[in-house]
Image (spheres, rainbow, N blue to C red):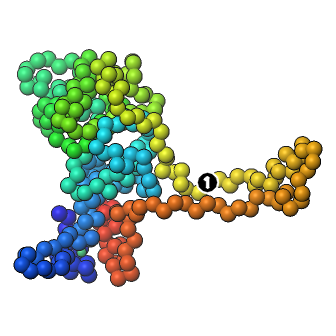
Amino acid sequence: MSAPNPNCKVCGGTGAVPEKYEPPHPPHFRRCECVLRLDIIANAEKGLVGLSSAPVIPSSPLMDKENKNLWVTAGEEFLAHLRHVAIRKPITWAFRVNSDAEMVTAWLATVAVSGQEIFDADAYTVSTRYMTLPDMVVPPDLLVVRMGVKVARNAAANEVLAEALQLRMHEGKPTWIWDEPHNPLGPGHLFWSDSLGRILLKWERVQRLESPLKGQPQRPTLPRETKEPRRLTLRRNPLPAELLAPDVTPPETPPETPPDPVAVTPTSAEAPQGRANRKSLRSI
Ligand SMILES: [Zn+2]
């Protein structure tokens, strides 16, 4: 549990808020919002350092797919979508982003322990953090494999990825593969193999994610009425003047979206602590 805000007026700095007491049940407490917000951020950071500062987006097609195997081809915008999902999950939800290079490193650790010679330019990165591939890929509730980090060739790379996915499927746990649009998984890719292709054949594929910048104000476009008269001159029987008025329909209001639990605006009574929280969040 994160440290509560000592100035919080809801919990008085204890981090716990008493719930309605109903004898003979013992008194119970809920986690105060000042702690919950930090815990959500901490859980996102545990999955991938820096994820909590990814751009905020109103919605994501990846939502509610955390229990499925997914193959996502996207650029850096993927992080905003992953953040969107991660901060809406319970703080007990364990997800982790590991790179393809880390998987090979974990596999090489086993080779190093057995005393065999390692032929890999990244051999110096072998550590005792993960002694075997299952140590790394099995524990998380959701494993996100980030492709494109490993550059140095390793003859076993494709087998390592296929084995990692098989291990996850054997455990009945979901995996998301995140590859890059300019270097998608396929024949010729460092990690591609026929067995990997057979595995991914059954996976849901997402090939396009909205960029976080999509919702931002865009450059002004030419007004529509400048084009209307030219088009109308081609008609044999022009329309009445009242129908030639420029299109002045108001812009559609954007649909309501669920709130971002981390970006909740504090009430006026809690504004000082909210600011304090955000300051402390930035320091994570
Ligand atoms: Zn509190």
Q: Residue at x 33, y 35 (%)?
A: 177
**Label 1, on which residue?**
218
Residue 106 or residue 16, whichever sits in front: 16
Looking at the picture, how far across and down is residue 235, in whole percent? 90, 44
Quadrant of residue 168 in the image?
Answer: top left
Looking at the picture, how far across and down is residue 188, in whole percent? 39, 18
Residue 70 or residue 238, whichever sits in front: 238
For disc 1, the neighbor class at 10 Å (few under 14, some 14 to 19, many from 20) is few
**Disc 1 marks which amino acid?**
Gln
Looking at the picture, how far across and down is residue 227, in whole percent? 81, 49
Query: Element under label 1?
Result: loop
Q: Quadrant of ligand 1?
A: bottom left
Q: How many marks?
A: 1
Residue 211 or residue 29, whichever sits in front: 29
Q: Residue at x 25, y 66 (%)?
A: 36
Q: Residue at x 76, y 58 (%)?
A: 247
Q: Quadrant of the N terminus?
A: bottom left
Above or below for 223 versus 162:
below
Looking at the picture, how far across and down is residue 8, in whole percent? 25, 78
